[in-house]
């Protein structure tokens, strides 16, 4: 879809702090990773039909920004290496709420987008969808309505011109007890694979017999890798086994994300 055909969305509560000034390690912005070169002066588009001038910068991301020098390079490089190998659908997962998972997902989307990669961020936390609100946009509808409407998934994707990444929001507020089969997230993931270099998926907490586990069961064949936010050894051991059983590669463990998020 041509850029001129995109439709503007309302944006609100944009704070003065914005990720334009965030430090990104020099080796990620100028060098090559796995034989793929990146030019941070150019912007590559995906397939979104909607756009905003810029997303808001959630205050919680400031804590991660302060640690960019120490944690950005290995995490982002893992995502870029995964993308270069064709493994583009990546879950951002943890075992509990208040783990820093959504904050980390937004921050990673911003950081990866600055390497000139086409990045999509999906809000799949249907129990508590918050990405659109945190980024200051008010979508009319979310991906959970995709299967029930005669529309392309493009109509639900939102580009940010300044931030150079795309979000796919969720607007459901019903907190379902089971993962509805009518929510065709699996085919959405597979479709976005061809349009984006990396698709980051903020999922519900992954725990036994809960919604996160049901989502993994439903979408695992279309998921390539996962990044786990370590909150307890018990949760991590169980999650590693679940990812292994589902055939999902573990990119790594992120420690202290919960403390960093709370520090803000």
Image (cartoon, rainbow, N blue to C red):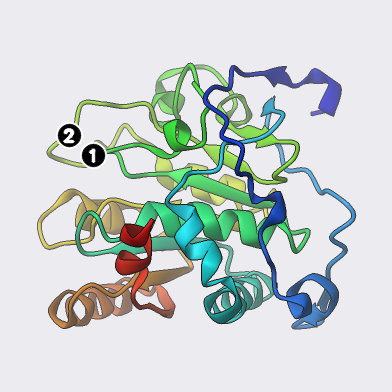
User: Which residue sits at x=62%, y=54%?
Assistant: 110
How many angstroms separate mark 2 from mark 1 (CA)?
7 Å
Q: Are marks 2 and 1 in contact (CB under 8 Å)?
A: yes
Q: Is residue 83 left or right of residue 135?
A: right
The residue identified by callout 1 is: 127
Task: Name the quadrant containing residue 85.
Answer: bottom right
Q: Quadrant of the C terminus?
A: bottom left
**Where does residue 186 sit, x and y in percent of width and height?**
43, 47
Query: Image quadrant of residue 209?
Result: bottom left
Sequence-wise, the earlier of marks 2 and 1 is: 1
Left or right: residue 46 versus residue 211 is right
Q: Residues within 10 Å of mark 1 (few under 14, many from 20)?
A: some
Residue at 81% in and 79% down: 32
Q: What element carries label 1?
A: loop
Residue 153 or residue 117, whichever sits in front: 117
Nearer to me, 62 or 35 = 62
What residue would you read off at disc 2? 176
Neighbours of disc 2 within 10 Å: few (<14), some (14-19), many (20+)? few
Q: Which residue is drawn at 34% across and 35% down?
A: 183
């Amino acid at each position: 879809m041509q850029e001129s055909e995109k439709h503007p969305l309302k944006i609100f509560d944009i704070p003065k702090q914005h990720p334009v000034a965030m430090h990104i390690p020099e080796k990620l912005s100028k060098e090559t990773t796995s034989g793929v070169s990146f030019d941070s002066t150019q912007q590559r588009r995906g397939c979104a039909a909607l756009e905003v001038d810029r997303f808001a910068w959630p205050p919680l991301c400031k804590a991660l920004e302060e640690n960019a020098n120490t944690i950005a390079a290995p995490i982002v490089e893992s995502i870029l290496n995964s993308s270069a190998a064709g493994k583009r659908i990546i879950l951002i997962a943890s075992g509990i709420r208040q783990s820093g998972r959504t904050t980390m997902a937004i921050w990673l989307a911003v950081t990866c987008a600055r390497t000139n990669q086409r990045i999509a961020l999906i809000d799949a936390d249907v129990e508590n969808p918050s990405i659109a609100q945190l980024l200051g946009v008010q979508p009319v509808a979310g991906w959970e309505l995709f299967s029930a409407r005669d529309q392309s998934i493009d109509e639900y994707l939102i580009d940010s011109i300044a931030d150079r990444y795309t979000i796919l929001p969720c607007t459901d507020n019903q907190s379902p007890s089971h993962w509805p089969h009518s929510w065709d997230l699996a085919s959405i993931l597979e479709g976005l694979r061809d349009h984006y270099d990396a698709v980051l998926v903020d999922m519900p907490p992954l725990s036994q017999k809960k919604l996160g586990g049901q989502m993994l069961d439903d979408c695992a064949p279309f998921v390539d890798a996962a990044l786990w936010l370590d909150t307890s050894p018990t949760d991590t051991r169980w999650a590693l086994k679940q990812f292994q059983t589902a055939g999902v590669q573990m990119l790594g463990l992120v420690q202290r994300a919960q403390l960093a998020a709370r520090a803000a």
